[in-house]
Each structure stands twice: as structure tokens, then as C-alpha cells.
Amino acid sequence: MGRFSGALLALAAVLVSPNAAYGQDNEAVLAAQQVFVLAEAYQRDSRTGDAEALLEALTRDRDPEIRAEARFRLGRARMAHQDFEGAAEAFAALLEEKPDAQPARLALAQALAAGGKPGAAARQLRRARAGGLPEDVQRLVDRFGDLLRRSRPYGINVELGLAPDSNINQATSSRTLDIGGFPLALDESGRATSGVGLTASADAFATVPLGSGLSWVNRIIGIGSFYRQERFNDLILSASSGPEFNLGKAVVRPAATYSWRQVGGKRYSHGFGSSLQVLAPIGGASQVGGSISISDQDYRIPEQGGLQLAAAISYERALSPRLYGRMEMTVQRVTAEADAYASTSFGSSLSLSRDIGAATVYAQAGYLRTEGDGPFALFGKARADDRVDLSFGAAWKRWSIGGLTPIVRLQQTFNSSPLDLYRFKRTRAEIVMTERF
């Protein structure tokens, strides 16, 4: 917390007193107010356990205003002795009933940032801005948001779960391929295969401060799916390293990159490259991002090797305190020794997420068009694929098992192509547990 403690203290100062925020002013709550006074006395005497026990009891009161004040006070009490996860749970529970309670949302952002979750804290700030803030509070929140990125020098986010999949190898369901008018039978390894696998991912980063407004960021990402039949195992690793600095309000991140993929226990591809990412706020509740990258990829099949260039632009916005949206457009150019493997792709995606009670649910739809440079000699046709991806999911923010948060995802993919080999459909479910360390 040391690097942005001043901003945290300033932000805490604008979080109005619970009584003012939630309107406790009638005789029906006099008994509850006496309990609040007693809880404050316990806190002054360092009897934090007794104070929190009283506040916990009031979070189950029949009056929603009393529950709101109790949760707000409970979160503040937990923040005081650095129980940031517990504080975030209290503020989140308050927001489930009162999504427009801006003091609680700002307090939640404060707790998330202090607990080492700057990305989640920044999203809460954008949601708060979408709900409207006084001008003086808005300026302070902007300052707090600017400091969030450097609030944590290192960390790792881990997911582990099960993934039932109708087509683990993304293969055609056809039993034969049409080659020059003659049918060629496919064996089982070349056809769509279903299975239940273990899915795992890890995203680790380390930031080294170099001076005022300049840091060096290192990142490693690993994603894997593992099955009883080793030939279907798929492991992807990527690494990046480079400086991060501000250009006005924008964050600029150039980096050197490396990627490596293994399929079926054998290396499928690897390559070195570079990337440039820019993120910039627009107004209070929006953010725009852009990226470009280039890499030289080597494949198991030598004819696939060549340069890959990609660009993307994204826009995300807190549409309300509960609703969040994101749009992205991408384009990719793949060169290869053989024209049949070279292609141009362009696509777009749209996602929406909404807080509903204790859960955050989301829906995402994406489209990708891929056009090959030349025909495959064996088939006499070039790729002209249309791919549609649909995804739905839910994360339970306040439920945990051993500190792990449950997430459920359902993904549906349809890929149409003039080539039977590339035509497939896929349904995949993921039930994972995630945690940030």
C-alpha cells in the first residue's frame, strides 16, 4: 500500500459517513444505532472481534438500510486491520442490494487495490463514474485510478478446473474427405473427438520501477488442456518483456515477445517477435485500447512458417454501475512458405457483463473471417472460413472454497469452410476455480 497510501487516505476521506449515506434518521432504528455506537467503542478499545461480531449480526437485519450501514461499517473496520479481502466482501454484499451506493463502490475499489487487485479496482472506478460523481470526488478518483497500475509490483492469477468438450481436437465430423472427386477415409485421430479434460492457466507478472513514470514489465502466460489421450494435450506459453510509461493520460507498453505451443507432447510452433500496446481513458467511464504485433513463427510443418502481423482496437465502457460492455476489432496477416497456409483474417467481438446478486454474468459473441492466399494442392480449394464464437459464463464473487472463486463458462464454436478439413463445430464447458496471489 505504501506506493499509493496517500491516494487511499484521500479517497477514504470522501467516503461519507454511513449515517449520511444511508439515511438512518427514524425511531425504528434507534436500537440499531445503539449497537453501532457500541461497536465503535469496541473498535476504540481494540476489541475488533467483538465490534465485527456486532456488525455481522446487523447485516442480517430485516431493514435494508440497517443492513447497508452495517456492511459499510464492517468493511471499514476490516480495512482498518488490513483484512482487505473481508472488506471487499462486505462492500460487495452492500452493492448487491444497493448498486447505486457510490460510497460503497469507491470503498470496494479501495479494498481491491489495497488487496493487490488493481484491474478489478479500476473496473469499479469506471462503474462509479458511470453512476455520476461530484466534481471534487471525480478529480480524486481520477488521481487514484492513475496510481492503480503501479500499486502491485508482482502477482499471479491461477485457474484450475474441468472442461467437458465435444470436439477437443477442433476436427471435422466427416468420416471422409473429398479429394479430387474421390473419398478419402479419415481415421479416428482425424475426426472430431469428445472428452473431459483438465484445464489450467496461469498469468504472472513482475514490474521493476526504473524512475518517475517508467517501469519495466515482465509477463508469462501459460494455458493448457490435458486429456487421458496424450495426443490431444495442448499447451501454450507466451512471454513478454519491455518498458511501460505514460504519454499524457495514455499508458504505452512496447515489448519483446516469445510464444511456444506443444500439441500431443510435441512442439507445434514457436516464434520471437515484438508488440506495442496503448491504453487510454476516455471520459470517466470508458477506456480505449490498441495493439500491434509482429512475430516470426516456425511450425512443425515447415511450409507453414513465416511472419505473422496482427492489430486490434478495443473500447470498453461502464454503461451503469451494474452493466459493463466491451467491443474489439482485429485483423491478422499470416505469411507462409506455401500460399495455401498464408491467410488474412479480420473479425470483431462484443461482450457484456452484469452484476446480478452475488454473481457476475457475461455473454460474448465473436466473428472471424479467414481467407487463404492459395488453394491446397490436395483439395484444389483455398480457405474461406467463417467462424462464430458464442460464450456465456458466471463468476460468484463472494463464494469461495479455500480462497478460490468458482467460475462457470459455456462456449460454442461454429466454423464453416469450403474445405472439409477445416469445417467443424464445438461445444465446451469449463468449471474452474480461480485465485489471484
Image (cartoon, rainbow, N blue to C red):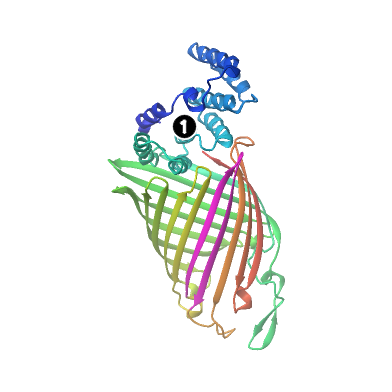
| Residue at x 49%, y 66% (from the top left corner) | 347
| Residue at x 66%, y 83% (from the top left corner) | 178
Magenta stretch: residue 368 in it?
yes
Q: Which residue is mark 1?
A: 103
Q: Quadrant of the N terminus?
A: top left
Q: Amino acid at mark 1?
A: Pro
- The chief SS type of the magenta part is strand
Residue 228 visible in rendering: no
Span highlighted in magenta in the image = 343-372
Using the image as rendered, state which of residue 83 and residue 169 is in the foreground: 83
Using the image as rendered, state which of residue 421 and residue 149 is in the foreground: 149
Q: Image check: 217 left or right of 99? A: left
| Residue at x 69%, y 71% (from the top left corner) | 191
| Residue at x 58%, y 66% (from the top left corner) | 388
- Residue 293 is situated, as x and y percent measured from the top left of the image, at 39, 62
Q: Secondary structure at mark 1?
A: helix
Q: Residues within 10 Å of mark 1 (few under 14, many from 20)?
A: many
- Residue 307 is situated, as x and y percent measured from the top left of the image, at 42, 70
Magenta stretch: residue 201 in it?
no
